[in-house]
Image (spheres, grey):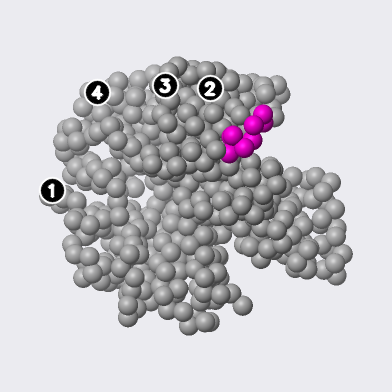
Amino acid sequence: MDTEEQLWRQIRVTDRMWEGAGQIAALEKVTRRVDALGLAAHGYEARVRLATAYLLGGEPAKVFEPLSWCLAADDPDPELDLRSVFDHLASAFTEDPRVPLADTLTALDEGERLFGPMPDNRLIVASHLGAIADVGYEAPPESSRCAHCDLGLRIDHLLRIGRLEDAAELFSDEDYCSRQPHSMRAALMLPFVRLGRLDDALEAFRLSYSAFWAEPSELGMLARHVEFCARTGNHPAARKLVDRHGGWRSVPFAEMDFHAAASLVAGAASDHASRALEIAARFDARNGNSAQSDRIRALLTVEPVLDSRELGSALLPGTKQIGSKIVIYPTTVEELACRAERNQDDPEFAAAMWDRFDELLPNPEGVLLARRLAARDDQPAEGALPPGAHAFRRAALTVEQAPLRALKFSREAVDLFQAEFDHVNAARARLMAVWILAFTGDPEAARDLSGECDAVGGNPEVQAEMLYTHGKLSQALGDLDEAAFRLPMAAESFESAGNTAALGWTRADLAELFLTMERFEDAADAAEEAVRLTPSVRARELRERAYFLRA
């Protein structure tokens, strides 16, 4: 039976999982375990996380059960951020018609009783319901949203009430978060055209599309790019975007907007238009009015804002033939660097990624400069790197010749990156230290170090590598239950990162682990998935063994 400490760890380790079915399943499982033992504090912490997981992982209508449980708790933990659940709930209400209107309003009432006024959440819900008033918007005294996303909300509100110049004047790209200023740029593309700022409109398109073009979760933002192309006389570019992203799945509101934008080039009688109106009708049935259908019908018949402005293929990510493969480049330098480092065993591919990196960013700074120099073994100019990046580079260059010295540098890099709040690169440096410890004969210390990584900056690839490494080290040390807990989370993160090869071998590792644990049904399922993803000899042999032992 799990101890209380093990259950705390199982709850908190889900923070490192990528949002989706895997995180939800892990939290539901541990919630059942703590309930069976009557552990109220554990149950509260698990349910705060479970409520957020439902909202962000595609099951928003399930949020009310864990949220109600937390609100009824006798002694809730004040340090747990229940406020963020209400903020996510307001957004989920607008995104999915399965989230009931009455329950949402009741929950927001309760949230305001606990946390005070929530004008941001009230505005989000009211705007979706069609109640748009020409009023100012002030940020609430408390919010889980960052200042950049709050600024994005204010710009969206100004655009809805027709105050284009005020919205454009408010825009700032000086600070960044995971979605800003890219979302603000996407919102301002067409307003810039209306204001005669064509160069700003094109720049907003390029930069925001570069941020979102590879993210299915951003289908709603990509709908704005399709609309921009269609309404500026660039129907060929709009059709390319529809062909590229039209098969993606996202929340219903994003799909509705994407199909409506696609109908601007496919026609008002197209399947895209019918699909958009069908989803809008589901929102209207939930909302009790026709606000969303009216909005979509207006978009289907909207007029161009510019007769013709030739944008061409320059708006789309570049392509290059590498051997027999046609590669569509990412357009962010971070993703180019990640792909180059991930494919070091394919020098031609890695070189092509670095070449494109150099085209987009000929003079990198900070961590990006460290990674570029490590790939070339270049010596940086004095003072060219910040302390964390400098230590990381020294570790990368000395790991083969002097691993213990590299271990010192990598630990130093972890501390320096954390001091800079650079969690992604802190995790990369920690992972390097873990590998050094593992391969210099101290796997237990390696596992302990890998278990300390609490934040990876939302990067699924780094998260997956850390979880995978921790799981394999646990398996090597005989802790099979811990390995069976970590490796599925690693698989979920590899899937989120789009790394099919890594996902395949992780599934094969799981099949092997489940065979050892005599979980033959699970082993067969994992092996089947491994064969589907990467049909290697090993995967097929594991599948045969699993089916034989299961029988």
Say whether disc 2 or disc 1 marks the residue closer to the N-terminus: 1
* Residue 136, numbered label: 1
- Assign a secondary structure to mark 1: loop
Q: Is residue 63 above or below residue 132?
A: below
Q: Position of residue 210 (x, y in %)?
A: 44, 31
Circles 3 and 1 in contact, beta carbons < 8 Å: no
Residue drawn at (67%, 46%), measured in percent from left and top?
Answer: 438
Say whether disc 4 or disc 2 marks the residue closer to the N-terminus: 4
* Residue 331 belongs to magenta span: no
| Kind of residue at badge 4 | Arg
Quadrant assignment for the C terminus: bottom right
Instruction: Indicate the quadrant where residue 22 lies.
Output: bottom right
Say whether disc 2 or disc 3 marks the residue closer to the N-terminus: 2
- Assign a secondary structure to mark 4: loop
- Assign a secondary structure to mark 3: loop
Q: Is residue 164 left or right of residue 18?
A: left
| Label 4: how many Cα within 10 Å (few below 14, some 14–19, many 20+) | few
Q: For the magenta stretch, what is the residue range?
A: 400-407
Real-space Cα distance between discs 4 and 3? 36 Å
Residue drawn at (72%, 62%), measured in percent from left and top?
Answer: 478
| Kind of residue at badge 1 | Gly
Say whether disc 4 or disc 3 marks the residue closer to the N-terminus: 4
- Assign a secondary structure to mark 2: helix
Q: Is residue 548 left or right of residue 62?
A: right
* Residue 197, numbered label: 4
* Residue designated by label 3: 384
